[in-house]
């Protein structure tokens, strides 16, 4: 139990600085820059999937958590959000390096995730162009109105509102992460390994579901199972594509359109499974 608590707290500590910086920038944009910066962000949005896919591949889950807040504030487009979530490498890279996986394998996995995230992001933005063009108009004010925090109605500057939102989301994430860590501990890794090994092609679907768990531990589990030969490449890719760390958890907390959140989750799962099946069909290993 002590280890579960420490792991949950550690996840929250790693995420908090990213969230705070995100809210701080959003507050600064809202209070200091006016329409000029908003229009600049909107114009840059068309290249968002490219930038998001590359930045998302860095080994940390804080950027995906920040992306949920940025999208809830309509600073980034829906396509950029998908690009970040799909490319997020989370703990995959550190695990592969620690297990002495070949550089070729690491680059192949990262390349797949970046390309898939970027392509999906551009496709989504082209499909919902009107929604993408609206990015940048609501920002932090929308979040404040939903939370009824009144942080935009006082003269406390930008630090207090940013800290308020960071603490609020971090506490929520801490509670949920503790529950997920406890569930994984009770189920046990051997049980999960046996489940994948006995289901062949269905492992792609199962790994995609595991990846959706809003926890950094899911990417560790999926990567280890692949390196141990339990998962094939397609199943591993499926789980790592759907795995966005705690990004989805933050999205559900700050974006109050639950129908949209469910659609985003379903879209991530479908993208991960389809790409995993195609990877296996192409004989990727």
Image: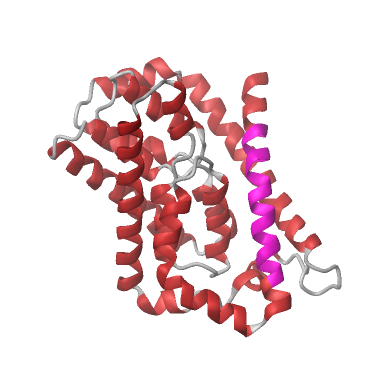
With respect to residue 120, does 216 lie above or below?
above
At horizontal 73% and vertical 76% (from top left) the residue drawn is 31
Quadrant location of the N terminus in the rendered image: top right
Which corner quadrant of the image does residue 159 belong to? bottom right
At horizontal 64% and vertical 39% (from top left) the residue drawn is 14
Magenta residues, start to end:
9-28
Residue 16 is left or right of residue 52, and the answer is right
Furthest-top residue in view? 190
Residue 173 position in % (x across, y down) = 62, 43
Q: Is residue 1 visible?
A: no
With respect to residue 12, does 285 lie above or below?
above
Furthest-right residue in view? 155
Dominant SS of magenta comes to helix
Quadrant location of the C terminus in the rendered image: top left
Which corner quadrant of the image does residue 229 belong to? top left
Is residue 19 a member of the stretch shown in magenta?
A: yes
Pick the front one: 54 or 150: 54
Residue 225 is left or right of residue 277, and the answer is right
Q: How is the image coloured?
A: secondary structure
Residue 137 position in % (x across, y down) = 56, 78
With respect to residue 61, does 258 lie above or below?
below
With respect to residue 17, does 159 lie above or below?
below
Furthest-bottom residue in view? 35
Q: Is residue 176 visible?
A: yes
Residue 177 position in % (x across, y down) = 58, 36
Residue 206 is left or right of residue 218, and the answer is left
At horizontal 38% and vertical 28% (from top left) the residue drawn is 223
Which corner quadrant of the image does residue 225 belong to? top left
């Amino acid at each position: 139990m002590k280890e579960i608590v420490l792991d949950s707290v550690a996840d929250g500590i790693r995420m908090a600085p990213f969230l705070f910086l995100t809210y701080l920038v959003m507050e600064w944009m809202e209070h200091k820059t006016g329409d000029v910066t908003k229009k600049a962000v909107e114009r840059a949005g068309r290249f968002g999937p490219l930038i998001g896919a590359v930045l998302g591949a860095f080994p940390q889950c804080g950027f995906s958590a920040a992306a949920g807040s940025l999208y809830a504030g309509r600073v980034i487009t829906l396509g950029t959000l998908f690009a970040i979530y799909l490319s997020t490498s989370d703990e995959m890279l550190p695990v592969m390096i620690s297990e002495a996986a070949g550089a070729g394998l690491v680059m192949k996995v990262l390349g797949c995730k970046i390309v898939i995230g970027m392509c999906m992001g551009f496709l989504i933005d082209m499909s919902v162009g009107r929604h993408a063009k609206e990015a940048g108009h609501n920002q932090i004010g929308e979040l404040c109105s939903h939370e009824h925090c009144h942080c935009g109605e006082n003269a406390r500057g930008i630090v207090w509102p940013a800290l308020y939102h960071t603490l609020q989301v971090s506490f929520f994430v801490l509670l949920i992460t503790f529950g997920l860590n406890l569930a994984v501990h009770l189920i046990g890794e051997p049980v999960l390994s046996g489940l994948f090994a006995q289901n062949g092609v269905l492992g792609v679907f199962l790994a995609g579901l595991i990846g959706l768990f809003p926890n950094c531990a899911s990417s560790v589990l999926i990567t280890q199972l692949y390196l141990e030969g339990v998962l094939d490449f397609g199943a591993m890719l499926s789980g790592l594509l759907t795995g966005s760390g705690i990004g989805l958890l933050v999205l559900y907390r700050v974006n109050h359109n639950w129908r949209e959140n469910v659609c985003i989750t379903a879209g991530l799962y479908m993208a991960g499974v389809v790409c995993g099946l195609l990877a296996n069909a192409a004989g990727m290993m």
